[in-house]
Amino acid sequence: MDYFNKLKSTVYSVKATVDSVLPGNALTRDFEWLQHVASAGPGLLWKVYKGYKKSNKREVSLWLFEKKLLDKFTHSERNQVIDSIRRGVCQLTRLKHPYILTVEHPLEESRDSLAFCTEPIFASLANTLGRIDNMPPTIPAELDSFSFENVEIKHGLLTLLHALSFVHTDAHILHNNICPESIMITKRGCWKLAGFEFCSSCKSSSDQQVQFDEVRYDDCLPVFAQPSLNYLAPEIILGGRIDTSADIYSFGVLIFAIFNKGRPIFDYENNINSFEAKIRELKVMPLPLTNNIPGVLREDFKLCFVLTPDLRPDASQLSRIEFLDSSDVKCLERLENMCQLNVGEKIEFLNELDNFLGKCSKRVCYWKILPWLIDELKIPVTASAALLRIICIAKKLTQNEYQLRILPPVLEMMKSDDVKVRALLLGEMQFLLENTPQSEIKSSMLPFLFSSLDVQVPALLELALKSIPTVIHLIDSKTMKNPLLPTLLRLATDVQVLSVKVNALLCIGSIVNSLERWMIMEIVIPTLARINSHEPGVLMVLLGIFQVIFNNKQFNLSKEIMAKYCLPSLLMASVENSLNLVQFESFIKLIKEMLSKIEKDQRLRLEGDTQPLQETFCKSKNENLIINIECNSTKPKGSRLSLEEKKRLAYEQEQELRLRSQAPIIPIIASKEKQAPPISAFDELSFSLASSLELGGNAKQNTSGNPFRPCWQNAAQQSANSTEPFSETSQGDRCLAQSQPIIPLIPPPPPSRAASSVSQAVKKSNTNLDDPFR
């Protein structure tokens, strides 16, 4: 979050700066200014901003010079600096060469500033060598601890020599300021020549030798108003014939600075006297100029510092030295000139590029090779070959770099109908999915995968089927239902190519646990059951799918589905002659497991149906009893009951209900030693009625003799067994203590004729009940 806040504040500060410096400037109207990325030009006065054109969103670099930087100088000095800056931009705009910086929009001047627009640049060579004058407070991360690789230096020097050769031979211009501030490094890693503020035109002498106008250096002028003294040739300061060899001397000093972290051979501190003294020393004894210079370059490098200008090599000769004549440099040079090759030569070169990619660093691939390969994607004939090398480079990059530079062209190529391009993308789909945001996968890659399932090329179908399980978690239920699942089932059932059929079934088996239950029951299983194949590969994949579905408790495979679809299909497959013993046993094992589950579920269902029927029967029987009692107690037609008759009938109903609700009587069997005499039916009935009516409360349990015998019979038995003499008082007390409290029954009133008929009806209905005393 802090990073985004910091970036936001930087953008706002840049906008405020530009708005204050460029009021009414055309570049603010046509271009969008972003962050400050570099500085360049004499004294690094130019600020270089990243931006893009508003009309077509094309990336550019916007150059800004603020006139307030010259406020400390006099008016004439200020005007002289501004004039040289105007002259340099105008000269740069007129020159057109692949290795000279391209101007996209000419110079625009306002009261407070000058500005123009060029192709996108990364930084100036001075910035990469450690000079950060006029740079933003926060140095871009790309410039932190920056260092060049040998192949970058070789190719950069070669491009500068090509540019100098054009300037000297074709444009007839002497640059006069070959230094790190005048060299720009583009976003493609190409070194390009700029900084023509102090260039001079040629003039013909009497001997027909090419000469150029003299450049005067005045150490009283600001350093911004004249070339860098540390890189000037001796003849420019000391006098003499000035020709193109003066730029070659400056080029030699530039080589020394590149290999020595930006430090030139001599630092004259903008003092002509110091310059003259050092040159005199150089005439007497040549200084060892081989510090950190590669051995293969040293001899050619020394030729650049010969004090006799005619002995110095020209730009064309230097471009053919051994140091620059390497296979790596030639490969990069051919890559930049691919537009000039025919189709056959392009294909041949791209095939040769594989060896170079294997030994190149990530930065060289990212800067110098990748942009040219992306351009080749626009040509259908070379698109597949270029895309293959782009993906090889992508595997060296970080995820952010991949999403920034490679993902956009890859997504664009997914719209292509070229079979080779589709096959390449499907083959690398796993890598692409791992590095692509989910939003892009859903919007671009999933439609590409689904469309690849409809082609008629078996190889593409196999590659697409292998990629589907990887993205199954990103597919919603609606898309799964239609079109994905029907397409997979169609490939598994209708396509006759065995490899496609097997891969389709494997894909279904991989995603089956991600499907919903209704999809399995209504779509997948019925369709798979119709597959009739004799190939062991197909049969074993089908077995695996059924096994996965059966073992998944979430699906809860029903016995009806197993009996109707699964078992018939498995039984038919198990008897195929193409199966071996191990495969047959796998089928039989699953068949037995399904049969066991069917048996268990069916038994539970049948046993569960019997118990509710019994409970229903008992409940209906009790309800019929109550209904019969209520029906029999209704008043006969044509009669009217008195209050006494109603009481009697209510009493009889209550007695009947009490008898029905009483638990069955279980007699207690006495031991053989003290066996009680038999109880008469009358005694048993009397005790039962007394207990049911609770006339005497809760009677105490008789601990001696039979509990169903009256107390007087128990007392008689005890007296018969007792050895004590009979006493009437004691016998009466004992009988009274063991007897139950007696509450006399109030006899009901005598029944009337109407009541007697109702009573008979009640008794008649009671004969249908199970009477335990009958």
Image (cartoon, helix red, strand yellow):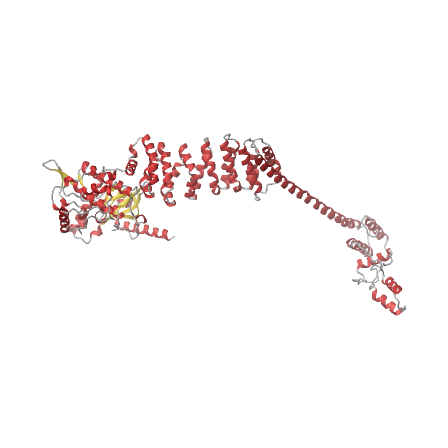
Tell me residue 293's x, y (percent).
23, 45
Q: Say left or right for 414 vs 596.
A: left
Residue 390 image point, x, y percent:
36, 38
Depth order, front residue of 424/325: 325
- Residue 215 visible to the viewer: no
- Residue 316 sits in which quadrant? top left
Which quadrant of the figure has residue 737? bottom right
Q: Residue at x 39, y 45 (%)?
A: 399
> Height in image: 355 above or below 751?
above
Q: Is residue 236 visible?
A: yes
Residue 674 to residue 50: above or below:
below
| Quadrant of the rendered image containing residue 703 | bottom right
538 sits to left or right of 289: right
Relative vertical location of residue 454 with respect to residue 553 in this rendering, above or below: above
Counting from the top left corner in percent of width and height, residue 376 is at 34, 35
Image location of residue 461, percent across then percent down: 46, 34
Q: Nearer the viewer, residue 625 or 499?
A: 499
